[in-house]
Amino acid sequence: MKIIEVADYRALSKVASEIIIKQVQQKPNAVLGLATGGTPIGTYRYLVEDYQKNQTSYHKIHTINLDEYIGLNHEDSRSYSYYMNDHLFQDINIPPEQTILPNATNSDCQKESEKYEERIESLGGIDLQILGLGENGHIGFNEPGTSFASKTRVVKLTESTRNANARYFQSIDEVPTYAISMGIATIMKSKEIILLVSGKNKATILTQLLTSNITEELPASILKTHPNVTVIADKDALSLT
Ligand code: GLP
Protein backbone atom coordinates (compact mmCIF):
# COMPACT_ATOMS: atom_id res chain seq x y z
CA MET A 1 0.00 0.00 0.00
CA LYS A 2 1.27 3.39 -0.93
CA ILE A 3 0.57 6.05 1.72
CA ILE A 4 0.03 9.71 0.94
CA GLU A 5 0.17 11.84 4.06
CA VAL A 6 -1.67 15.14 3.82
CA ALA A 7 -2.11 18.01 6.26
CA ASP A 8 -5.85 17.92 6.74
CA TYR A 9 -9.27 16.92 5.46
CA ARG A 10 -9.26 19.62 2.79
CA ALA A 11 -5.98 18.39 1.34
CA LEU A 12 -7.17 14.78 1.49
CA SER A 13 -10.30 15.73 -0.44
CA LYS A 14 -8.30 17.63 -3.03
CA VAL A 15 -5.78 14.83 -3.62
CA ALA A 16 -8.54 12.19 -3.87
CA SER A 17 -10.53 14.31 -6.31
CA GLU A 18 -7.46 14.79 -8.50
CA ILE A 19 -6.95 11.03 -8.74
CA ILE A 20 -10.59 10.55 -9.74
CA ILE A 21 -10.51 13.39 -12.29
CA LYS A 22 -7.35 11.96 -13.84
CA GLN A 23 -9.05 8.56 -14.16
CA VAL A 24 -12.09 10.14 -15.83
CA GLN A 25 -9.89 12.07 -18.24
CA GLN A 26 -7.77 9.05 -19.12
CA LYS A 27 -10.73 6.70 -19.53
CA PRO A 28 -13.93 8.63 -20.26
CA ASN A 29 -16.01 5.43 -19.97
CA ALA A 30 -14.41 4.31 -16.69
CA VAL A 31 -16.32 2.49 -13.96
CA LEU A 32 -15.93 4.30 -10.64
CA GLY A 33 -16.65 2.52 -7.37
CA LEU A 34 -18.01 5.06 -4.89
CA ALA A 35 -18.34 5.21 -1.14
CA THR A 36 -20.58 7.11 1.25
CA GLY A 37 -20.07 8.23 4.86
CA GLY A 38 -18.66 11.54 6.01
CA THR A 39 -15.17 11.12 4.57
CA PRO A 40 -15.76 11.38 0.79
CA ILE A 41 -18.08 14.41 0.98
CA GLY A 42 -15.20 16.87 0.48
CA THR A 43 -13.89 14.80 -2.44
CA TYR A 44 -17.29 14.95 -4.14
CA ARG A 45 -17.41 18.70 -3.53
CA TYR A 46 -14.12 19.09 -5.40
CA LEU A 47 -15.41 16.94 -8.26
CA VAL A 48 -18.42 19.21 -8.60
CA GLU A 49 -16.22 22.32 -8.42
CA ASP A 50 -13.96 20.89 -11.14
CA TYR A 51 -16.99 19.98 -13.28
CA GLN A 52 -18.29 23.54 -13.04
CA LYS A 53 -14.89 25.05 -13.88
CA ASN A 54 -13.51 22.60 -16.42
CA GLN A 55 -16.53 20.60 -17.63
CA THR A 56 -14.80 17.25 -16.99
CA SER A 57 -17.39 14.99 -18.54
CA TYR A 58 -19.10 12.06 -16.84
CA HIS A 59 -21.54 11.26 -19.62
CA LYS A 60 -19.93 7.88 -20.37
CA ILE A 61 -18.93 7.07 -16.77
CA HIS A 62 -20.68 4.38 -14.74
CA THR A 63 -20.65 4.47 -10.95
CA ILE A 64 -21.16 1.52 -8.66
CA ASN A 65 -21.72 2.17 -4.98
CA LEU A 66 -20.45 -0.01 -2.20
CA ASP A 67 -23.59 -0.41 -0.18
CA GLU A 68 -27.12 0.60 0.76
CA TYR A 69 -29.25 0.24 3.88
CA ILE A 70 -32.06 -2.25 3.59
CA GLY A 71 -35.46 -0.66 3.92
CA LEU A 72 -34.64 2.95 2.99
CA ASN A 73 -35.82 4.06 -0.43
CA HIS A 74 -34.05 6.61 -2.63
CA GLU A 75 -36.32 9.45 -1.46
CA ASP A 76 -35.29 8.90 2.16
CA SER A 77 -32.64 11.49 2.96
CA ARG A 78 -30.71 8.91 5.02
CA SER A 79 -30.39 6.44 2.16
CA TYR A 80 -27.09 6.23 0.34
CA SER A 81 -28.93 6.70 -2.92
CA TYR A 82 -30.18 10.09 -1.72
CA TYR A 83 -26.70 10.94 -0.39
CA MET A 84 -25.08 10.26 -3.78
CA ASN A 85 -27.60 12.40 -5.67
CA ASP A 86 -27.29 15.14 -3.12
CA HIS A 87 -23.50 15.25 -2.95
CA LEU A 88 -22.56 14.40 -6.52
CA PHE A 89 -24.86 13.03 -9.19
CA GLN A 90 -27.27 15.95 -9.47
CA ASP A 91 -24.37 18.35 -10.00
CA ILE A 92 -22.46 16.56 -12.77
CA ASN A 93 -23.51 15.33 -16.23
CA ILE A 94 -23.82 11.63 -15.41
CA PRO A 95 -26.98 9.98 -16.81
CA PRO A 96 -29.00 8.63 -13.83
CA GLU A 97 -29.19 5.14 -15.36
CA GLN A 98 -25.38 4.95 -15.17
CA THR A 99 -25.37 5.52 -11.40
CA ILE A 100 -25.81 2.13 -9.79
CA LEU A 101 -26.57 1.35 -6.15
CA PRO A 102 -28.05 -1.80 -4.66
CA ASN A 103 -31.85 -1.62 -4.71
CA ALA A 104 -32.37 -2.43 -1.06
CA THR A 105 -36.15 -2.03 -1.22
CA ASN A 106 -36.34 -5.08 -3.46
CA SER A 107 -38.32 -7.84 -1.73
CA ASP A 108 -35.58 -10.33 -2.63
CA CYS A 109 -32.34 -8.66 -1.52
CA GLN A 110 -30.34 -11.85 -2.01
CA LYS A 111 -31.34 -11.94 -5.67
CA GLU A 112 -30.64 -8.21 -5.94
CA SER A 113 -27.14 -8.89 -4.57
CA GLU A 114 -26.48 -11.55 -7.21
CA LYS A 115 -27.72 -9.21 -9.94
CA TYR A 116 -25.41 -6.51 -8.58
CA GLU A 117 -22.40 -8.77 -8.86
CA GLU A 118 -23.38 -9.62 -12.47
CA ARG A 119 -23.85 -5.94 -13.28
CA ILE A 120 -20.30 -5.15 -12.13
CA GLU A 121 -18.95 -8.01 -14.24
CA SER A 122 -20.92 -6.92 -17.30
CA LEU A 123 -19.39 -3.45 -17.04
CA GLY A 124 -15.93 -5.01 -17.11
CA GLY A 125 -15.21 -4.49 -13.41
CA ILE A 126 -14.35 -1.41 -11.39
CA ASP A 127 -11.46 0.75 -12.60
CA LEU A 128 -11.09 2.90 -9.50
CA GLN A 129 -12.70 2.14 -6.15
CA ILE A 130 -12.96 4.79 -3.42
CA LEU A 131 -13.14 3.43 0.13
CA GLY A 132 -13.62 4.87 3.59
CA LEU A 133 -12.53 3.06 6.73
CA GLY A 134 -14.95 2.12 9.49
CA GLU A 135 -13.79 2.69 13.06
CA ASN A 136 -13.80 -1.10 13.44
CA GLY A 137 -11.82 -1.63 10.25
CA HIS A 138 -14.75 -2.34 7.95
CA ILE A 139 -14.77 -1.49 4.26
CA GLY A 140 -18.16 -1.07 2.62
CA PHE A 141 -20.31 -2.77 5.23
CA ASN A 142 -18.01 -5.77 5.53
CA GLU A 143 -17.73 -6.07 9.26
CA PRO A 144 -14.90 -7.78 11.21
CA GLY A 145 -15.07 -11.53 10.68
CA THR A 146 -16.32 -11.25 7.08
CA SER A 147 -14.78 -13.82 4.76
CA PHE A 148 -12.24 -12.39 2.35
CA ALA A 149 -14.03 -14.50 -0.30
CA SER A 150 -17.34 -12.67 0.24
CA LYS A 151 -19.33 -11.24 -2.65
CA THR A 152 -22.22 -8.78 -2.71
CA ARG A 153 -24.81 -9.93 -0.19
CA VAL A 154 -27.10 -9.03 2.69
CA VAL A 155 -25.13 -8.13 5.80
CA LYS A 156 -26.03 -7.50 9.42
CA LEU A 157 -24.50 -4.33 10.87
CA THR A 158 -22.64 -4.48 14.15
CA GLU A 159 -23.76 -2.31 17.03
CA SER A 160 -20.55 -0.27 16.75
CA THR A 161 -21.30 0.55 13.11
CA ARG A 162 -24.93 1.40 13.89
CA ASN A 163 -23.68 3.67 16.67
CA ALA A 164 -21.09 5.32 14.42
CA ASN A 165 -23.80 6.05 11.83
CA ALA A 166 -26.50 7.08 14.32
CA ARG A 167 -25.51 10.73 13.84
CA TYR A 168 -27.46 10.71 10.58
CA PHE A 169 -30.65 9.48 12.28
CA GLN A 170 -32.93 10.85 15.00
CA SER A 171 -32.04 7.95 17.27
CA ILE A 172 -30.10 4.69 17.23
CA ASP A 173 -33.39 2.77 16.93
CA GLU A 174 -33.92 4.23 13.47
CA VAL A 175 -30.56 3.02 12.13
CA PRO A 176 -31.22 0.01 9.90
CA THR A 177 -29.84 -3.32 11.06
CA TYR A 178 -29.25 -4.76 7.61
CA ALA A 179 -27.67 -3.56 4.40
CA ILE A 180 -26.61 -4.86 1.01
CA SER A 181 -22.84 -4.55 0.69
CA MET A 182 -20.38 -5.32 -2.03
CA GLY A 183 -18.20 -8.17 -0.79
CA ILE A 184 -14.51 -8.09 0.00
CA ALA A 185 -13.65 -10.27 -3.00
CA THR A 186 -15.70 -7.90 -5.17
CA ILE A 187 -13.83 -4.86 -3.87
CA MET A 188 -10.48 -6.60 -4.33
CA LYS A 189 -11.18 -7.17 -8.03
CA SER A 190 -11.04 -3.38 -8.60
CA LYS A 191 -8.07 -2.40 -10.70
CA GLU A 192 -7.13 0.48 -8.40
CA ILE A 193 -8.28 1.40 -4.89
CA ILE A 194 -7.95 4.54 -2.81
CA LEU A 195 -8.65 4.41 0.89
CA LEU A 196 -9.52 7.73 2.53
CA VAL A 197 -8.80 8.11 6.23
CA SER A 198 -9.35 11.36 8.09
CA GLY A 199 -9.62 12.50 11.68
CA LYS A 200 -8.49 11.56 15.17
CA ASN A 201 -11.33 9.05 15.53
CA LYS A 202 -9.63 6.94 12.84
CA ALA A 203 -6.12 7.12 14.35
CA THR A 204 -6.39 3.89 16.36
CA ILE A 205 -7.79 1.76 13.56
CA LEU A 206 -5.37 3.21 11.01
CA THR A 207 -2.42 2.33 13.25
CA GLN A 208 -3.81 -1.18 13.64
CA LEU A 209 -4.28 -1.46 9.90
CA LEU A 210 -0.73 -0.35 9.13
CA THR A 211 0.83 -2.70 11.67
CA SER A 212 -1.49 -5.72 11.68
CA ASN A 213 -1.24 -9.05 9.94
CA ILE A 214 -3.74 -9.81 7.22
CA THR A 215 -6.76 -11.03 9.14
CA GLU A 216 -10.50 -11.24 8.60
CA GLU A 217 -10.85 -9.59 12.02
CA LEU A 218 -9.63 -6.40 10.35
CA PRO A 219 -11.35 -6.40 6.94
CA ALA A 220 -9.27 -3.53 5.49
CA SER A 221 -6.05 -5.52 6.12
CA ILE A 222 -6.71 -7.49 2.91
CA LEU A 223 -5.92 -4.31 0.97
CA LYS A 224 -2.25 -4.95 1.73
CA THR A 225 -2.35 -7.82 -0.76
CA HIS A 226 -3.77 -5.69 -3.60
CA PRO A 227 -1.22 -4.47 -6.17
CA ASN A 228 -2.58 -0.94 -6.53
CA VAL A 229 -3.85 0.61 -3.30
CA THR A 230 -3.19 4.16 -2.14
CA VAL A 231 -4.08 5.24 1.37
CA ILE A 232 -4.64 8.97 1.64
CA ALA A 233 -4.54 9.92 5.30
CA ASP A 234 -4.40 13.23 7.12
CA LYS A 235 -2.16 14.13 10.05
CA ASP A 236 -4.94 13.52 12.59
CA ALA A 237 -5.55 10.00 11.29
CA LEU A 238 -1.80 9.32 11.31
CA SER A 239 -1.28 10.91 14.75
CA LEU A 240 -0.75 7.58 16.53
CA THR A 241 1.61 6.00 14.00
C1 GLP B 1 -20.15 3.53 6.68
C2 GLP B 1 -20.07 3.11 5.21
C3 GLP B 1 -18.65 2.89 4.78
C4 GLP B 1 -17.82 4.07 5.24
C5 GLP B 1 -17.72 4.07 6.73
C6 GLP B 1 -16.90 5.21 7.31
O1 GLP B 1 -20.42 2.50 7.56
N1 GLP B 1 -20.83 1.96 4.88
O2 GLP B 1 -18.61 2.73 3.37
O3 GLP B 1 -16.54 4.00 4.70
O4 GLP B 1 -19.02 4.15 7.26
O5 GLP B 1 -17.67 6.36 7.38
P1 GLP B 1 -17.13 7.80 7.69
O6 GLP B 1 -16.46 8.25 6.45
O7 GLP B 1 -18.37 8.60 7.98
O8 GLP B 1 -16.24 7.68 8.84
Image (cartoon, rainbow, N blue to C red):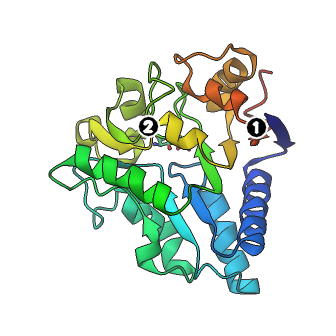
Tell me the kind of residue under disc 1. Answer: Pro
Mark 2 C-beta closer than 8 Å to ligand 1:
yes
Residue 5: x percent and y percent? 85, 40
Residue drawn at x 25%, y 60% as measured from the top left: 73
Q: Residues within 10 Å of mark 1 (few under 14, many from 20)?
A: few
162 shown above or below 85: above
Count of numbered tags: 2
Mark 1 vs 2, N-terminal side: 2
Q: Are marks 1 and 2 in contact (CB under 8 Å)?
A: no
135 shown above or below 18: above
Tell me the kind of residue under disc 2. Answer: Phe
CA distance separating discs 1 and 2:
22 Å
Disc sitting over residue 128 in the figure: none
162 shown above or below 218: below
Q: Quadrant of the N terminus?
A: top right
Assign a secondary structure to mark 1.
loop
Residue drawn at x 47%, y 21% as measured from the top left: 144
69 shown above or below 88: above
Q: Quadrant of the C terminus?
A: top right
- Foreground pick, 143 / 165: 143
Q: Which residue is mark 2?
A: 141
Q: Which residue is mark 1?
A: 227
Residue 231: x percent and y percent? 75, 40
Residue 197: x percent and y percent? 68, 39
Q: Residue furthest left?
A: 107
Residue drawn at x 84%, y 42% as measured from the top left: 4
For residue 138, side relative to residue 22 (left or right): left
- Foreground pick, 12 / 236: 12
Assign a secondary structure to mark 2.
loop
Q: Nearer the viewer, mark 1 or mark 2?
A: 1
